[in-house]
Image (spheres, helix red, strand yellow):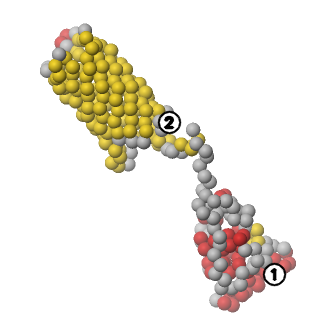
Amino acid sequence: MRSLRILLLFFVSILTALGDERLTNETVIHMVQAGVGVDLIVQTIRAADTFQFGLLPGDLIALGQAHVPEAVVKAMAQRLNHPSPQPEGATVEPALPAQGAGPVGSAFINPEPPLPLHAEPGFSRAEVFGGYTYLSVDAIRRFGFNGWQTASIINVNRWVGVEGNFSGTYGLKTEDYLLVGGPRFTFRQFFAHALVGANGLPMSRGIGLYSVAAVFGGGMQVPVGHGFAVQPFADYVFTHYVVAQNNIRVGGGVVYRFGRAGAGPR
């Protein structure tokens, strides 16, 4: 093994002396692909008189795709910090920069470029919700209606979206349907919405009572799996049948979030 190491070092020295060949990323990749051992490649890098390594993000990606071992990349970085050839057995560690730090010589070790200023984390483009709702109806005295609620949300960005909300509740042999829509605002797992639309109390033979409606409230989402979350909510619901009604609805259900948008500048 020692004789093979000496032979390879001698071969590299001859190429350098006769052809002014520098040890480059391509040379290292060829050595890895030829099956040369990691220790032997590291010693060759340390003993080379001339070299021209590139360790910019694009270079590191190419080295990674060629399966160049980490120890070899560190040896290349060490030569950028210590241009003089290192004797065999030297254990000088390369002065690698901290994550996101500046250059080593003329190269960057961190292969991941920083996010641009004002970078926006990823968010879900769309959400669908379905669940239970309880409506406390203000009609002389309070009456409780039970039912369901669905909603669809299209998010413009991680802060603002547009929501369409439809619910049906039942009690006192009466059906109450609410169809509203409007903006929705999100902060982390919390949200608030301000929705307007119509409320209907259908009766027999197509006859019913109808009113404008407004909903103000919000809730939160608690993730429970990939794309899924549990969502409790509470809303104030305004309707007007002869006189104003100040209704309250609460409930909860499951929301599915999909169409995730990648991070990027706002």
Q: Quadrant of residue 124?
A: top left
Q: Quadrant of residue 151?
A: top left
Instruction: Report whether residue 216 is seen.
Output: yes
Q: Residue at left 19%, top 13%?
A: 203
Q: Residues within 10 Å of mark 1 (few under 14, many from 20)?
A: few
Q: In 3D space, how far apart are the residues under numbered discs 1 and 2 (Cα atoms)?
A: 61 Å
Circle 2 sits in a helix, a strand or a loop, which is it?
Answer: loop
Q: Residue at left 21%, top 25%?
A: 136
Q: Amino acid at mark 2?
A: Asn
Q: Quadrant of residue 188?
A: top left
Question: In the image, which disc is placed on residue 157?
Answer: 2
> In the image, is 236 to the left or to the right of 35?
left
> In the image, is 109 to the left or to the right of 249?
right
Position of residue 20 relative to residue 222, above or below, is below
Tag 1 residue: 14
Q: Amino acid at mark 1?
A: Ile
Give the percent coordinates (x, y) of residue 39.
62, 81
Q: Residues within 10 Å of mark 2 (few under 14, many from 20)?
A: some
Q: Residue at left 69%, top 90%?
A: 3
Viewer-proximal residue among 92 and 19: 92
Give the percent coordinates (x, y) of residue 191.
39, 35
Position of residue 149 relative to residue 239, above or below, is below
Q: Residue at left 31%, top 31%?
A: 150
Position of residue 175 relative to residue 133, above or below, is above
Give the percent coordinates (x, y) of residue 236.
30, 25
Mark 1 or mark 2: whose residue is earlier in sequence: 1
Position of residue 188 relative to residue 206, above or below, is below
> In the image, is 65 to the left or to the right of 53?
left
Outermost residue toward the right in this view: 18
